[in-house]
Image (spheres, helix red, strand yellow):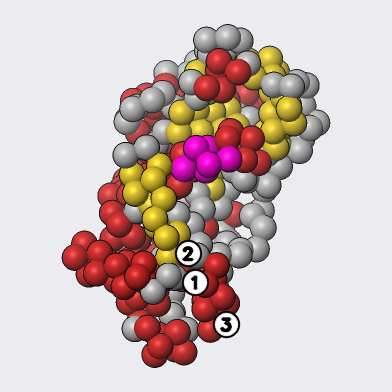
Amino acid sequence: MGLWQIGTDTLAHSRFVLSPFAETFASLKLLHSGTGAHPGEEAWLRAHLPGYRARLAADPVAELLVRAAIGTSWIADFFCPTSCVGESFEETVARVRAAGPGEARANLRVSLKGPLPAALERDDLPERATALLTYVWEETVRPYWQRRRRVLEADMVARTARVSQGGWAAALDSLKPGTRWLGESRFQVNVNAYPPREIAAGAELLFMPVTPRTSWVSWEGRERYAVVYPCLGVLAEDHHRRPVPAALGALIGTARAGLLALLTTPMSTTQLVAVTGQGLGSVGRHLRVLLHAGLVERRRAGQSVLYVRTAAGDVLVEASGADTGDRKPEAVIHPS
């Protein structure tokens, strides 16, 4: 298994952070696979996969490059640097461009687990990688970034609430399939048979949510480590297209039923506005009705007030046939 030895001080100072670059790379992986994990991803692929494939068809070197860089169990290091806290997409991708040609080829041999195709024995691989990543950001991620950012922020608040309620062990166990806190400072980051890594005291440990259903781990030297994980499915899907069960809608109203179905995950009023598109006033009024009916309850996480379904709310949602938040397992890829 992939095992990290993490001191208590390092874990205590770890952070959930946003990374536009990680979101872009996760979107590239989704385009590369061509298969969505839920209707929201499928709709996004229908909109953007034809353009992506046309771009690769016009640049066969780029197509070979992305296939080699993503690999089967390891991502080429130069292609996916670990974002810093607060770093923009442009700042992170500049480090892709700055990679040396020899370094890029060596990284690709590792991800391929063998020699490079002759077409990749060239010096412009960092520039081509930068151009492809920039295309994915500009054409397929940036137009949706404001909504995705709010969704990712909602995930981070929910994860932080989980830390406050159940400790870091509970939060790490629930990040994604394959992650588990083993005790004695041991964190299993994936199921791959990699040598254990000891994270030195003072190193930066970051947890980065992405909306596509994918994951990986990465590090920069011994100073910075990151676990990229799929944000909670209930947040990642496109709820504007998600139907509310007719029976539940008829009983308590369609908008109110939609909120109740979402609240299998603790969410704030602002987060519900972000993922549903309803107005702040409407969401607030619906939450008050649900609260007074005993179908949701309030919890505090730091300065945020979160709402979550009660046992009575769970029974009502399940009886109506609404989705309770279960999703099929992600297609796990665990490269570093």
The stretch of residues the image draws in magenta is 161-166
What residue is shown at x 65% (from left), y 63% (from top)? Answer: 328
Marks 1 & 2, CB-CB < 8 Å contact: yes
Mark 3, residue position:
319
The image quarter containing residue 98 is top left
Which residue occupies the foreground of this view, 179 or 185? 185
Q: Earlier in the sequence, mark 1 or mark 3?
A: 1
Q: Is residue 293 left or right of residue 6?
A: left
* Alpha carbons under labels 1 and 3: distance apart: 10 Å
Helix, strand or loop at label 3? It is: helix
Confirm whether the magenta stretch covers residue 164: yes
Confirm whether the magenta stretch covers residue 266: no
What residue is shown at x 28% (from left), y 49% (from top)? Answer: 146
Which residue occupies the foreground of this view, 230 or 117? 230
Marks 3 & 2, CB-CB < 8 Å contact: no
The image quarter containing residue 64 is top right
Which residue occupies the foreground of this view, 331 or 237? 237
In the rendered view, would you say 322 is above or below 306? Answer: below
Circle 1: residue type:
Gly
Mark 2, residue position:
309
* Alpha carbons under labels 1 and 2: distance apart: 5 Å
* Alpha carbons under labels 3 and 2: distance apart: 14 Å
Nearest to the eye among marks 1 and 3: give it: 1
Mark 1, residue position:
313
Q: Please, which residue is most extreme toward the top here?
A: 201
Examine the residues drawn in magenta and state their main secondary structure. helix
Residue 65, position in %: x, y? 56, 37
